[in-house]
Image: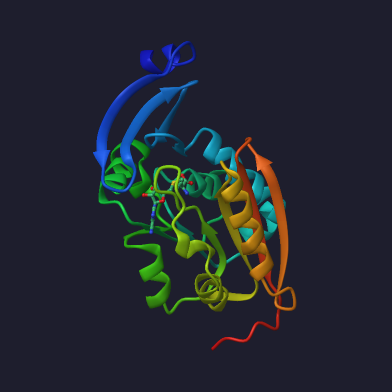
Amino acid sequence: MLKKWLSYIVPINIKTEKSHWSKTLEVTWANGELVLDSAHTNYSYGSLQRILRIGLLKIGFERIAQMNHILVLGVAGGSVIKTLVREVGYSNKITGVEIDANVIAIAKAYFELDTIPNFDLILDDAFEFVLKTKEQYDLIIIDIFQDTKMPNFLFEAFFVNRILELLVPKGLILFNTMCLTEADNNRNKSYLELLDLTVVQVQTIPRVEAHNEVIIIEKLGNHATT
Ligand SMILES: C[S@@+](CC[C@H](N)C(=O)[O-])C[C@H]1O[C@@H](n2cnc3c(N)ncnc32)[C@H](O)[C@@H]1O
């Protein structure tokens, strides 16, 4: 409790460990809340939670509360899962996919992710998982970072087409991206250009918390599944 109050004055780190995927993982009290950071960016709670909350608000909490199954690719400390359960009031199924076993151990030990009854956490590469899953989802949240880097597969036509196949008609993708360089801006521009506007409707929320662009993609009723 003392650490929590002191953290309003200065951040207090309580755990640091090495990670193959994220260089380091740090659990820190900051401004009265426990946050998870990688070597160079915030992973969970703090600004990351605010960014995804803005995306969820844009979709509409009431609409989300009525969904049946939400897939979260990139779980870390699970701040978006807490937003879904505690703020949106969503009580149906959530599946989370996380590549880093160390992150999962931290999520359970410090962020009590294993106490959320409607949440299933799977240790897997999101790319592999989306190839295997036979489920259909109402909302797919893509929030995948390896420190500040976003893997290339996220921006390829193959991946977006596969994700669209997994969505129910009128289902949504909430994609959190980071734009730190001109190359990142161009990457996002090319990504938006590859989306077929006869099968999806797209909204972007640029410059969320300075460096993030949130992309919301809604599958129209007529996307052919192959
Ligand atoms: C920004 S954090 C996710 C934050 C989380 N959505 C939240 O609401 O707190 C990014 C996560 O993506 C994970 N990640 C990176 N590459 C991945 C991959 N290929 N498949 C699944 N997870 C991956 C990282 O280990 C990290 O935990």
Residue in view at x 37 percent, y 16 percent: 3
* Percent position of residue 200, x then y: 70, 72
Q: Say which quadrant the N terminus sits in.
A: top left
Q: Say which quadrant the C terminus sits in.
A: bottom right
Q: Nearer the viewer, residue 114 or 190?
A: 190
* Percent position of residue 84, x then y: 55, 50
Please give left or right for residue 39 compared with residue 219 in the image.
Answer: left
Please give left or right for residue 3 compared with residue 57 in the image.
Answer: left
Does residue 6 sit above or below 137 in this rendering?
Answer: above
Total tally of numbered discs in the picture: 0
Q: Nearer the viewer, residue 185 or 195?
A: 185
Q: Is residue 73 visible?
A: yes
Does residue 163 sit above or below 11 in this rendering?
Answer: below
Residue situated furthest front in the rendering: 183
* Percent position of residue 155, x then y: 53, 63
**Which quadrant would residue 128 be assigned to in this image?**
bottom left
Residue in view at x 33 percent, y 56 percent: 99
Q: How is the image coloured?
A: rainbow
Please give left or right for residue 46 compared with residue 55 in the image.
Answer: left
Q: Nearer the viewer, residue 219 or 83?
A: 219
Residue situated furthest bottom in the rendering: 226
* Percent position of residue 206, x then y: 69, 46
Q: Is residue 93 visible?
A: no
Residue in view at x 48 percent, y 43 percent: 79
Residue in view at x 55 percent, y 76 percent: 161
